[in-house]
Image (tube, helix red, strand yellow):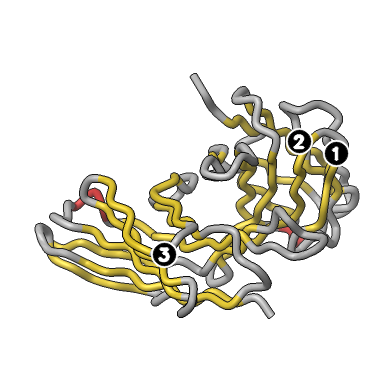
Amino acid sequence: EAQVTQNPRYLITVTGKKLTVTCSQNMNHEYMSWYRQDPGLGLRQIYYSMNVEVTDKGDVPEGYKVSRKEKRNFPLILESPSPNQTSLYFCASSRIKPGQLEQYFGPGTRLTVT
Amino acid sequence: GQNIDQPTEMTATEGAIVQINCTYQTSGFNGLFWYQQHAGEAPTFLSYNVLDGLEEKGRFSSFLSRSKGYSYLLLKELQMKDSASYLCAVRAVDRSNTGKLIFGQGTTLQVKP
């Protein structure tokens, strides 16, 4: 089954404790992206990657890191989480071929930082 | 700057037709997407427009006018399960950010019996 998976689905952590949220897709998509969703602010792009070893900042990259060592994986790293990073996070992937740009989203990771 | 506007909330009656509007101002344009998102779930793809005109897909249609920076999503024969948020998103293009996808805040549609 074609899908984007994220782990963990739920996480409660404390300020300053490094964490990684994994994202994996099995559709051989070139493009992958991370978003956060907050009430009243909609979906905001954190980082995206057009292909292996190619990453770029979205609108809200501060406090986050990503890597794209393999085509299928795109982990999101919070080196020192803070309470303002409490949010619902989505990973997404797509082709980059014109006409096939629709993004497929993972199920989401609800992160709480205390 | 980059900006996408949609109404925050709409209400419609089961069986009716509803139109959700989206206006945008972005640096460059490489397509407009509509997504549906039920509460607590991931967004799911509905439609993609890159050229002017109407794209029809079953009960859902999407229209784009690039010169006006305007799109709408039309939902026909509304069903209770169509109660959800509808997200308008634009793929912006400039010299360094060829992959940026900018979302509007979403329109929460409530379908009533």
Mark 3 vs mark 1, CA separation in Å: 37 Å
Mark 2, residue position? A74
Residue B33 screen position, x and y as percent: 48, 56
Name which residue type carries label 1. Ser
In whole angstroms, how far apart are the C-alphas of marks 2 and 1?
Answer: 6 Å
Q: Cα distance, mark 2 to mark 3?
A: 34 Å
The front one of A71 and A84 is: A71
Residue B98 sits above or below residue A96 on the image: below
Question: How far across and down, in percent of the image, does residue B84 sit?
Answer: 34, 56
Residue A26, label in figure? none
The quadrant in which the C terminus of chain B is found is bottom left
Q: Secondary structure at mark 1?
A: loop
Whether residue B113 can be seen here: no
Residue B29: quadrant of the picture: bottom right
Q: Residues within 10 Å of mark 2 (few under 14, many from 20)?
A: many
The correct choice, above or below, for A75 with respect to B56 in the image is above
Considering only vertical position in the picture, is A72 above or below A53? above
Q: Which mark is residue B52?
A: 3
Q: Nearer the viewer, residue A83 or A26?
A: A26
Q: Is residue A68 left or right of residue B64?
A: right
User: What residue is at 13 percent from the left and 55 percent from the top?
Assistant: B77
Name which residue lies at 44% across and 53% down: B35
Classify 10 Å Cα crowding around label 1: few (below 14), some (14-19), many (20 and above).
some
Q: Secondary structure at mark 3?
A: loop
Percent across and percent down for residue A43 are: 58, 60
Judged by depth in the image, the label closer to the viewer, 2 or 3, is 3
Q: Are marks 2 and 1 in contact (CB under 8 Å)?
A: yes
Residue type at numbered disc 3:
Asp
Residue A67, label in figure: 1
Residue at mark 1: chain? A
